[in-house]
Amino acid sequence: MQNMLQKIVSNMKLTSLKKYLQLMHVCGLLSLPDYSKDPKNIQKQKLYTICNRTFVTILIISFGINLFMNTIKNASLFCENLFVLSIVIATFGTACLIQIRLKMFIQTLDFFETTARLHRENKAVSRLQNIERMFIPVALLTTAVLVFLHVIVYPGLPKSTEELEALSKVYNLKYPQNALGFPLFIPFVDTSDPKVFYLSFGLEIYGAIMVTLADVLTIVVYPLSVLHLKYHFTILKDLTLLVGKTHFNSCGQPIFYTNLLENEKVIRRFKKDGKKLEPPMSEQDKHLSHWFERHPDLYETFYLREHSVSIGTHPSTQTPG
């Protein structure tokens, strides 16, 4: 788990939605399928994830009980905390729902990311990938700063006499200057008591980290999923425009495509000073190049078939013999 975290941190310049899911796996909010061949490690990860989710659920319930038992006495605080509670429930619930379909979701991500990587010379795809690499770090940093200010900074800020009196009255606190950023309900316990406050404060920070990760996942999952679809349709659009035309690679050499989705191709024979030249290539590629050049109509049919296959979910890798 430590090695996975180090790998994620060292590759932050290549941040993607899949890498973010790996980070959530390390932090115990998701349990990635097939991440380990050792059944013991899988069971440990599942137990770790269940414990983290249970802990966050208890914090949410405690915050909710306090909201409707105490915060309701103050309209402005109630509205503010109700808004926060709604966001937390929605984002944490989204993370739990994603776990249910996580294997299928990761398979879909693998398909789209692989296709985009194989077509990385496409300028439009390159621009879209740059957007993705920036989106998650910006969302994570922004959300973390907002949560940090409310959970960590707020308890240490000086408060006016009126604010202290309001906190004491609403939450029945003996030491209102020790009010938590997100007030929790613990039966028969005053969370402002110095003997309890620091423990409660530490637990709330840990819970806030978990909620921050869930918040960011909810923020990025839809736009990045749409972005991956845009990768794919951009590639399909460019391949469609090549129908009936001579195909060239990024170096300007004429080519024949053998697999569109995997961007596999063979270089076409070309003439120079009246002589036919062939670049170095394997015998199989040479055979394909010769076959396609002798049968341009069949190549066109093959290209159209590959194009129609590429529109489906799982690409075909068949090539003519």
Image (cartoon, rainbow, N blue to C red):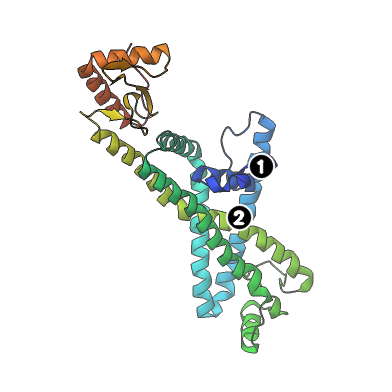
Q: Is residue 179 visible?
A: no
Q: Look at label 1 and name its amino acid.
A: Leu
Q: Residue at x 30, y 32 (%)?
A: 311
Are the residues at dot 2 and dot 1 in contact (C-beta closer than 8 Å)? no
In this rendering, position of residue 16 left or right of residue 183: left
Tell me residue 223's x, y (percent): 41, 51
- Disc 2/disc 1 C-alpha distance (Å): 16 Å
Q: Secondary structure at mark 2?
A: helix
Tell me residue 222's x, y (percent): 41, 50
Q: Is residue 310 visible?
A: yes
Image quarter hosting the N terminus = top right
For disc 1, the marked residue is: 47
Q: In the picture, residue 236 is in which quadrant? A: top left
Q: Counting other residues with Cα less than 10 Å from the Cα at mark 2, is it few (<14), some (14-19), or many (20 or more)?
A: many
For disc 2, the marked residue is: 210
Report the label total.
2
The front one of 147 and 123 is 123
